Amino acid sequence: MLLALFPLWLQFSCTESVSPQEDTERSLVVPPPDLKVAFIGDSGYGPRTDRVLELIRQEGAHLVLHQGDLGYDEGNLKAPVNWHSGIERILDAGVEGGRFPYLYSVGNHDVRHWRQRDPPGYSRILQERVEGTPGLECTGDLGVKSSCTYKGLFLVLSGVGSIGQGHRRYLSDALEEGEDFLWRIASWHKNQQDMQAGGKRDDTGWGVYQDCQEAGAIIATGHEHSYSRSYTLTDLGNEAAGHGATGSPERVMLGQGKTFVLVSGLGGKSGRDYHCEQHEDDTWWASVFTRNYWIKNGDVKEKNCSVMDPESKQYARTVQEYADGALFITFNPGGQTHLARGEFLTVEGDRIDEFEIVNERGAEAAVSPDGGGEGG
């Protein structure tokens, strides 16, 4: 078990920081109150990405979870260093004596520079960041087949669909090893066509999605340069049944056989359309935010599936609020261990999505790790 790697956490008695529904037979590790995680993907580097990083800093996030496609610029050996310089300049600069907690999964545009040695590639940069970040513990091939813990969160970083083999087995085993954590998150870059709002194809297979559903783990992806967030899903891979979408759009549930999917791909590189012809029959999206379509918790704010831009050959942009941004999820808000609250914010200050996450496993006793509510 990975918990064996963290003996300090096991020094807590079951009477400390427990939920009212204490079960003396079991205790789950939970984050400290109000732990905020920023989810982004498909960033690149430059002024647009800098604005997203500044938003993350302004919102007081404690951790960034980046779902791949970091620096792009694949013909430039310095792309990883150039991308990393923005993290250092904007996020690390605000952390006294250390590095801002920042984790990422490999994306398809990262593969060429992932393992390069000189200048350092993304893999080496990630390794150095993990080693220099207090409280962040990881095992495995970082960003490809790895598991990390940070302040009571259990995180699996996968390269499924982008690099390597055997991802489903690793993911399944890792989620089982992390079963003593209330909140588990699986992060990878690519998707299945139904699990994004644009033109991407099937790249990962349904197995990794289904294993996360069975475990009740959050599924965080990127790849498509837009934002989308599903209803609670209970039958992933079964398109005819709407992937088992159920419940209300503003509240998603986690538990055995229940999960939800998020795509946060507006990290700064570019933005794309909602592909009407591919997704008009989709019934599982609670919120979508693209150039031509914005639906917030089931309420259509703007939709253009007819007017095209003759120059770009895309749908004409009709969502005036459209901009880059990040999804923020705050775990254990106000000490409610079984809850989390999500909101997607743009660099222009618009709140595009807001929802609640209820973790059904929260009825079990919970033990908070050391570290309080402070983050990077």
Image (cartoon, rainbow, N blue to C red):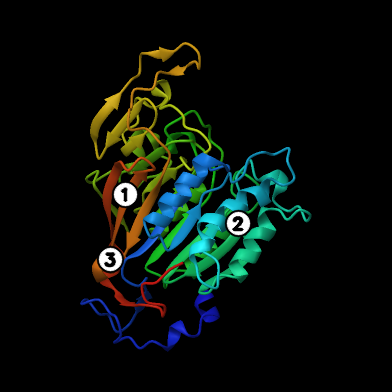
Q: Can residue 115 be seen in this view?
A: yes
| Label 1 environment density (alpha carbons within 10 Å; few <14, some 14–19, many ≥20) | some
Query: Is 33 located above or below residue 249 in the figure?
Result: below
Query: Is 109 located above or below residue 359 in the figure?
Result: above
What is the secondary structure assignment of the residue under circle 3?
loop
What is the secondary structure assignment of the residue under circle 1?
strand
- In the picture, measured across the screen, residue 78 lies left or right of residue 94, that is right
For discs 3 and 1, the disc positioned in front in the rendered view: 1
For discs 2 and 1, the disc positioned in front in the rendered view: 1
Residue annotated with mark 3:
338
- In the picture, measured across the screen, residue 31 lies left or right of residue 42, that is left
Residue annotated with mark 2:
143
Viewer-proximal residue among 181 and 206:
181
Amino acid at pointer 2? Gly
The image position of residue 299, as x and y in percent, is 22, 34
Viewer-proximal residue among 2 and 211:
2
Name the residue rendered at 29%, 54% in the picture.
253
The image position of residue 137, as x and y in percent, is 55, 72
| Label 3 environment density (alpha carbons within 10 Å; few <14, some 14–19, many ≥20) | many
Q: Earlier in the sequence, mark 3 or mark 2?
A: 2
Viewer-proximal residue among 97 and 372:
97
Query: Is 223 located above or below residue 156 in the figure?
Result: above
Residue annotated with mark 1:
343
